[in-house]
Image: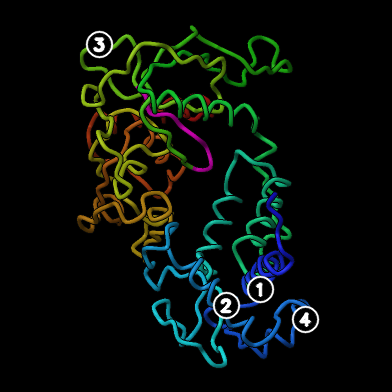
């Protein structure tokens, strides 16, 4: 019967203890020496003699920096254990080892991005975000990261979790992702918060004909909400893309029918491009066909003074074109942006003292009709 020898067991324990210590206490900017390790209380009974220590470091160096069959050396940038002066192809004994450190796979800046992503997710609670933060810090970083960022996430609260059914959203996302992967149609019920006759009896549920049948294509996150880009089934020539709020979907069923090909659906991106202007053209995830909208922006008084562009950059980024100055009726700048007419009308109303829609004429007429309705509501002459 096979029986482990004490020395073999000790060598494994020794290697793991040293590696755990290096992961926690070193990085490329905090290199350690053999003396540093020997002065550590945590490693006092582990390092062994100089020869034992050197042998352990060499084995760790080889094991962590080669592929599974030991026939291929990783690029040095991908090495996990780095020992200055020690190379994988050198069989000679090494003197005092210096510049020993664990090369962490993620930099501090990259860890910041990962944790910011976790804290921005609507599909996990504050408690789960805190648990994952601690787990990632323990597994992927060293003590210097914790010291640098120890106040970063301690006081954050994910307020959005109060307004959303996290578990149902998770379930919906899993089913939709499976349907997209399998290229299958979906059937679902669409819901909303609404009151019918009694305004004190607000309920969550369907308000129109259900269920809906669609072909799903992309899941998009916009303003902390999850949306599904899809087309209505059965397909009809000229069918346009539709956008559905995923957290408002329920009773989702994956059907056996194959999806309609993307290239048959109007306005739908055939391939997703992260650099596209989709978020601008479909402002607030409106799915009507984008148009080139010309508008005049001005100060709130209309006087000739510097014009604040912050609200434009907040909405469109730099995806707009400044055409010219204009002093007709009042002073302002003429700009052009490609965006959903439905979305831009509501946006323009929210900035009514700064924005005037000029073209196309049908969008301007639609704005006039909205203003007439406001005039009627507020009983203006």
Q: Residues within 10 Å of mark 4 (few under 14, many from 20)?
A: few
Badge 3 vs badge 1, beta-carbon distance below 8 Å: no
* Residue drawn at the location 63% of the way across and 74% of the way down: 22
Q: How many marks?
A: 4
Tell me if residue 229 is in the magenta stretch.
yes
Q: Main secondary structure of the magenta part?
A: strand
Tell me if residue 35 is in the magenta stretch.
no
Q: Secondary structure at mark 4?
A: loop
Which residue is label 2 attached to? 57
Q: Residues within 10 Å of mark 1 (few under 14, many from 20)?
A: many
Q: Does label 3 or label 1 sit earlier along the sequence? A: 1
Q: Does label 3 or label 2 sit earlier along the sequence? A: 2
Gap between marks 2 and 4 measured at Cα: 16 Å
Q: Is residue 122 above or below residue 335?
A: above
Q: Quarter-wise, where is residue 57 in the image?
A: bottom right
Q: Where residue 65 sits: x, y (%)?
A: 46, 68
Q: Which residues are magenta?
A: 223-230
Residue 44 numbered mark, or none: 4
Residue 236 numbered mark, or none: 3
Q: Does label 4 or label 1 sit earlier along the sequence? A: 1
Choose mark 3 or mark 1, whichever is in front: 1
């Amino acid at each position: 019967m096979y029986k482990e020898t004490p020395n073999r067991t000790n060598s494994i324990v020794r290697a793991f203890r040293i590696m755990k210590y290096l992961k926690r206490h070193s990085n490329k900017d905090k290199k350690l020496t053999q003396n540093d390790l020997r002065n550590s209380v945590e490693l006092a009974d582990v390092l062994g003699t100089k020869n034992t220590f050197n042998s352990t470091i060499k084995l760790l160096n080889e094991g962590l920096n080669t592929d599974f069959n030991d026939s291929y050396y990783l690029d040095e940038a991908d090495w996990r254990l780095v020992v200055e002066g020690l190379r994988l192809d050198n069989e000679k004994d090494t003197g005092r080892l210096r510049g020993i450190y664990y090369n962490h796979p993620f930099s501090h800046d990259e860890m910041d991005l990962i944790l910011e992503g976790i804290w921005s997710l609507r599909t996990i609670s504050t408690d789960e975000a805190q648990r994952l933060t601690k787990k990632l810090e323990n597994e992927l970083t060293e003590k210097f990261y914790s010291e640098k960022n120890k106040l970063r996430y301690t006081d954050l609260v994910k307020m959005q979790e109060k307004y959303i059914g996290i578990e149902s959203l998770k379930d919906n996302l899993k089913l939709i992702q499976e349907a997209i992967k399998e290229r299958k149609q979906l059937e679902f019920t669409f819901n909303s918060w609404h009151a019918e006759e009694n305004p004190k009896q607000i309920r969550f549920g369907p308000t129109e004909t259900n269920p809906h049948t669609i072909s799903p294509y992309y899941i998009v996150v916009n303003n902390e909400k999850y949306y599904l880009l899809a087309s209505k089934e059965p397909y009809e020539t000229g069918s346009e893309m539709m956008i559905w709020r995923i957290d408002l979907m329920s009773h989702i069923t994956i059907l056996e029918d194959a999806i309609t090909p993307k290239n048959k659906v109007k306005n739908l991106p055939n391939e997703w491009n992260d650099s596209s202007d989709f978020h601008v053209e479909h402002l607030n995830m409106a799915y009507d066909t984008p148009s080139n909208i010309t508008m005049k922006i001005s100060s709130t008084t209309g006087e000739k003074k510097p014009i604040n562009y912050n609200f434009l950059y907040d909405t469109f980024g730099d995806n707009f074109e400044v055409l010219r100055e204009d002093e007709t009726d009042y002073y302002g700048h003429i700009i052009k942006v490609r965006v959903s007419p439905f979305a831009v009308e509501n946006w323009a109303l929210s900035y009514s003292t700064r924005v005037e829609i000029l073209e196309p004429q049908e969008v301007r007429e639609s704005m006039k009709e909205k203003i007439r309705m406001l005039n009627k509501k507020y009983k203006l002459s």
